[in-house]
Image (spheres, rainbow, N blue to C red):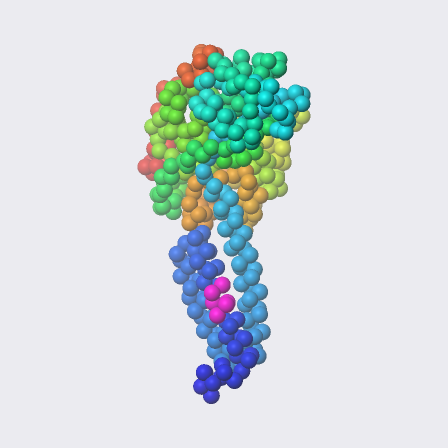
Amino acid sequence: MDYKSYISSSKLAKITLALLIVEIILSAYIVIQAALYLGTGAAVIGAISIVVVSGLLWLCHYKKAKVCIGLEIVVAIILIIGMMAVLKINGLAGDISRTTEYETVQIVALKNSGITKDSNFSTYTLGYTNSDDGAYDRSSKMLVENDKKVKESKPYETTDALYEDLLSSKTHLMVLTSNTRSDLSIIDEEYEDKIVVLFEKKYEIGHAELKAVDITKEPFTIYLCGADLSAGEDINSTGRGDVNILLTVNPKTQQVNMQVIPRDTFVYIPCRGGNSKLSYSGWWGGVQSSIDSIEDKFDIEINYYAKINFNGLIDLVDSLGGVTVYSHYTYSYQGYSFVEGYNEVDGQKALRFARARKMLPQNELSRGQHQMELIKGIFRKFAENPTYENSMAVLDSLSNNFVTNLPKKDYYDAFKLVLKLLPQLENMENHSMEGTYKWHYDEIRDGYYQYYFYPDEEEIKRVHDSINAIIEGEE
């Protein structure tokens, strides 16, 4: 019997053929999606596997239709599991690849004022600082969009004056932008506990520039940015850069270098055309602004970035089952105690370990040392179960609190590179910086007198030279 007659005469043959076609389509989709993360080599192997398995199933379908239906059910189950894995990985990759950043603009009131978003605003005064670019226009549009009118929109020379009037109820509403939040963090560290957000809108500020290389062959530097919750819990909102660490890797020579940049470092901030603290650069202009400031200060090139916030750090450590960190000092902070030497920490304790500074001998510099120790502790714990599945599970726990501009096609290569360099990553030297703190008025924000970290000139050169040495593959 020829094949055409066979198909026409057998209902089971029609079913097995239909299943085979569906399974080929599903297999091709899974292979194509997997190739985005595993590379062309995996795609070729997958394509060959599809041809071989499909050919065998077709022969079975033609010769032994009853046996074929059983085999196709098994294959279908495998494909369903594969499809679920692909959809999960795609969803995760989509979450952590959300690199568009936003400035969050809010209209707030005091919690104890009794004002809600449903209140009649016609008797209220809305305050904003005239140094806030667009604060008046944006807040006016937000009011119109929410069908609200205020008695007056009042400009203030300084955030101090605005906040003082809000606390004394001379002004009822306040516009918060990245600029205002940075001011308030100095005026009153607990201001967030005293206000309620009535309306909020996000304004896109763009993406950080990607300077891609072949990470399997070429050296690169990745900027590890730890943002606080100054802009809320949205990882893509601009916020103060509490952690600024550069990780330089040379895959050929297998050299690595980790350098912390203190958040109070006095740097040029291109998006504001003046100098201020590094932590404010990210607050005002996002990750790209921080990268620009660091590149300008140390005359280096940053290829990629990875950004995590406080919630993400907690989730990361907890997803690993806790980590072991080395503390250079014995101290207590926010109800948690640390001893000089190795300490076991869960997510909450790890956050305190990464944030404590005021009780440490070198303040911000000591905190930078501990932040690098925490990164090494995370690599050490990952080394206990260094599988791709485990790394994806860890990333899954971070999906809402972690982003990176590393291309999706490089994820698996990055995993293999981490695996290859684990001994070096676990035992990296901690490179801090020597310098002095100076008090003076801010160049960008009029009237603000605070301290800034000035790294020694030889330290700036050392950072530049040590990163370039890794890039060039020098001993």
Please, is residue 179 above or below residue 15 in the view?
above
The image quadrant where one finds the C terminus is top left
Q: Nearer the viewer, residue 444 or 61?
A: 444
> 299 or 276, which lies in front?
276
Write down the region rendered in magenta: 21-26
Residue drawn at (47%, 85%), measured in percent from left and top? 5
Q: Residue at x 53, y 54 (%)?
A: 87
| Residue 409 location (% of width, % of height) | 42, 49
In the rendered image, residue 309, in percent from the top left (x then y), is placed at: 54, 33
Identity of the residue furthest to the bottom in this view: 1
Whether 55 is drawn above or below 277: the answer is below
Asked if the magenta segment contains residue 23, the reply would be yes
For residue 253, side relative to residue 109 (left or right): left
- The structure residue drawn at horizontal position 45% and vertical position 52%, both measured from the top left corner, is 37
Identify which residue is drawn at 47% across, 43% down.
97
Name the image quarter holding residue 258. Answer: top left
> Which quadrant of the view contains residue 234?
top right
- Please state which of residues 415 and 271 is positioned toward the viewer in this rendering: 271
List x then y, in percent, for residue 172. Answer: 60, 19
How many numbered marks, from 0 up?
A: 0
Q: Is residue 420 visible?
A: no
Is residue 448 located in the magenta-colored stretch of the structure? no
- Residue 141 position within the rendered picture, expressed as x and y whole percent measured from the top left: 49, 29
Q: Report the magenta stretch's main SS.
A: helix
Decide: is 390 above or below 196.
Answer: below
Q: 416 left or right of 300?
A: right
Tell me if I can see residue 113 in this picture. yes
